[in-house]
Image (tube, coloured by chain):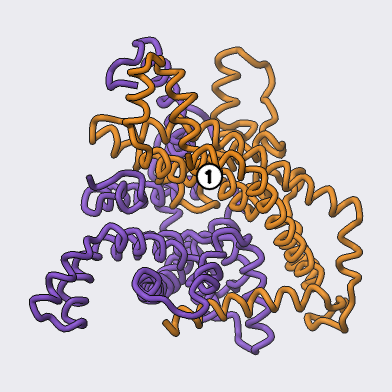
């Protein structure tokens, strides 16, 4: 397919298809925004009156505030620990040969295919057997395991894209190994590390199924609080908090794309 | 090194705990399990549970299939878009839903699909239907929302494969007289099979673990394994049975994934050539 040689009709058809799919992706966000600004408690499209009241109600809601607080604690710890563990392991995977390397890699990547409810239930039973209360430690441990594959992947891809000649050059100029690591390898890995941490943080903050098992009323994270809200109430406060969520996440990703180049991190484009 | 080993051990211990509970007896009114037994697994063969397992697999297949059909054109557009701005827009729109979590996305779909939701209001106003169409509590509604949930990861996997294809092959096909459709079907599509296989298997595995979507949109009418596990664990406190359901679910998911891999091997060879 030479560039620009496709039939105009084919291009039009392709363009329309892609636009329709993007529409499908955006539709829920668009509709939930309409619902959030609806003045009445009952849904109507388009809204008859507009208001901010559901945003005010959502922000003032105690369970959401507590959920945000708990979520930030869990996410802060889980994503940071996962970053350190994941980056060290990615480096080891890329550079060294050691016993059980393949087994360890498989186990650490397995949360990608093991259902989250199995992992959540496992940590719940384990905590009960070891006599831990359902505190933050169990939630953090569970989240570390769940987000680790994403950190691993993101750092590993940046390591693969790194030109080894730069490190060799530094070493040949007399830099000792730790100096090569701190002044060449780590700075070059910053985009991979930052995006790995960002992915881990966003995924941990939003993790729901496993969290439902390991959190208690006192330690519930925001998604769990939102789930309980949807089950009990039907007013658009949930729409309002969804809009805050969607806007916040989209902004973070636009920022990440502008400064880190998400395409390279996700391995969908090449730095040629 | 050792922190990674610690994480792996933690995960292994959690899975071992589930396995251990799955072969223990349920003591009504107590959170502690009884002696060792295989009764939990015998109970799994009851039609009620067998149906949920079959339903789950069917829903996973439908979701993976439609995510592939919808995701392929998007991945293609993402990789081949010529303008940087267009590429970035497609990328951000595609992956934002991945980071919203199941609850926000499921709730948004309730607002879209509900009886007085967006879609029904629009259809009623346009006069296409006289009464609200029942999207909620149906498999159609659940699969629609699940496809939306799975699409980002599918697109990422497909785009990764498509971006690795050397475009000289397509140019060679074109120079030999193949039209754009023929070049796509005989060159690009076969070369992207590794991405298709990775995308479909990942979509399947992710959907298998879905909980909030079948719970809230299925509303008890459409049940998946996760809903049953939660119900048994937190409504009846029958943790041993919940654990055996989890183990059975895990084994089943792995078995289906292995089958898919085996079925895909001949196709993978086409892609590797």
Q: Closest to the observer: B180 or A133?
A: B180
Quarter of the figure with residue B39: bottom right
Residue A240: percent from left, percent from top: 44, 47
Residue B212: percent from left, percent from top: 62, 52
| Residue found at x 62% / y 68% | A119
Image height of B273 relative to A217, above or below: above
Image height of B54 relative to B172, above or below: below
| Residue found at x 51% / y 61% | A207
Using a 10 Å C-alpha cutoff, classify the residue at mark 1 as few (fewer than 14 neighbours), some (14 to 19) or many (20 or more): many
Which chain is tinted purple? A
Image height of B74 relative to B263, above or below: above
Q: Can you identify the residue that label 1 sits on? A: B199
Which chain is tinted orange? B
**Quadrant in the picture for the C terminus of chain A:** top left
Image height of A234 relative to A170, above or below: above
Does B72 sit left or right of B175 as displayed?
right
* Residue A70 visible in the displayed image: yes
* Residue A37 visible in the displayed image: no
Residue A80: percent from left, percent from top: 36, 73
Chain letter of the residue beneath label 1 in the structure image: B
């Amino acid at each position: 397919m030479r560039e620009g040689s496709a039939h105009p009709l084919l291009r039009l058809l392709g363009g329309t298809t892609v636009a329709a799919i993007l529409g499908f992706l955006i539709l829920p966000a668009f509709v939930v925004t309409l619902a959030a600004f609806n003045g009445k408690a009952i849904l109507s499209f388009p809204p008859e009156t507009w208001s901010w009241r559901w945003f005010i109600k959502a922000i003032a809601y105690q369970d959401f505030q507590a959920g945000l607080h708990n979520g930030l604690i869990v996410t802060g710890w889980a994503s940071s620990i996962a970053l350190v563990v994941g980056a060290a392991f990615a480096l080891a995977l890329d550079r060294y040969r050691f016993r059980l390397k393949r087994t360890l890699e498989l186990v650490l990547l397995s949360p990608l295919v093991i259902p989250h409810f199995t992992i959540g239930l496992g940590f719940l039973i384990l905590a009960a057997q070891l006599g831990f209360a359902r505190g933050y430690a169990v939630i953090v441990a569970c989240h570390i395991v769940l987000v680790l594959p994403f950190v691993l992947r993101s750092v590993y891809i940046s390591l693969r894209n790194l030109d080894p000649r730069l490190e060799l050059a530094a070493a040949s100029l007399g830099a000792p190994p730790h100096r090569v690591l701190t002044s060449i390898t780590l700075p070059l890995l910053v985009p991979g590390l930052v995006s790995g941490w960002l992915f881990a943080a966003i995924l941990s903050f939003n993790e729901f199924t496993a969290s439902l098992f390991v959190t208690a009323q006192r330690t519930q994270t925001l998604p769990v609080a939102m789930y309980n809200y949807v089950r009990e109430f039907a007013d658009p406060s949930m729409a309002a908090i969804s809009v805050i969520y969607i806007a916040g996440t989209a902004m973070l990703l636009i920022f990440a794309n502008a400064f880190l180049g998400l395409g390279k991190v996700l391995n969908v484009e090449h730095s040629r | 090194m050792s922190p990674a080993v610690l994480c792996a051990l933690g995960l292994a211990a959690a899975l071992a705990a589930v396995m251990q509970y799955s072969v223990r007896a349920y003591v009504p009114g107590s959170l502690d399990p009884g002696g060792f037994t295989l009764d939990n697994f015998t109970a799994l063969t009851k039609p009620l549970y067998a149906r949920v397992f079959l339903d789950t697999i069917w829903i996973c297949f439908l979701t993976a299939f439609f995510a592939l059909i919808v995701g392929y054109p998007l991945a293609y557009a993402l990789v081949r878009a010529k303008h940087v701005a267009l590429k970035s827009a497609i990328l951000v729109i595609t992956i934002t839903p991945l980071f919203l979590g199941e609850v926000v996305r499921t709730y948004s779909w309730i607002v879209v699909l509900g009886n007085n939701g967006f879609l029904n209001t629009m259809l009623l106003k346009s006069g296409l239907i006289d009464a609200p169409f029942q999207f909620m509590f149906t498999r159609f509604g659940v699969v629609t929302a699940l496809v939306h949930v799975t699409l980002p990861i599918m697109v990422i996997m497909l785009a990764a494969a498509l971006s690795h294809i050397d475009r000289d092959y397509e140019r060679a096909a074109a120079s030999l007289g193949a039209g754009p459709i023929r070049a796509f079907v005989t060159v690009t599509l076969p070369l992207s099979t590794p991405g298709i296989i990775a995308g479909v298997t990942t979509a399947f595995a992710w959907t298998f673990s879905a909980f909030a979507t079948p719970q809230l949109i299925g509303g008890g009418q459409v049940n998946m394994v996760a809903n049953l596990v939660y119900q048994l664990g937190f409504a009846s406190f029958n943790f041993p049975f919940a654990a055996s359901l989890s183990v059975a679910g895990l084994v089943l998911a792995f078995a289906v994934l292995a089958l898919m891999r085996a079925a895909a091997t001949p196709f993978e060879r086409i892609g590797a050539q």
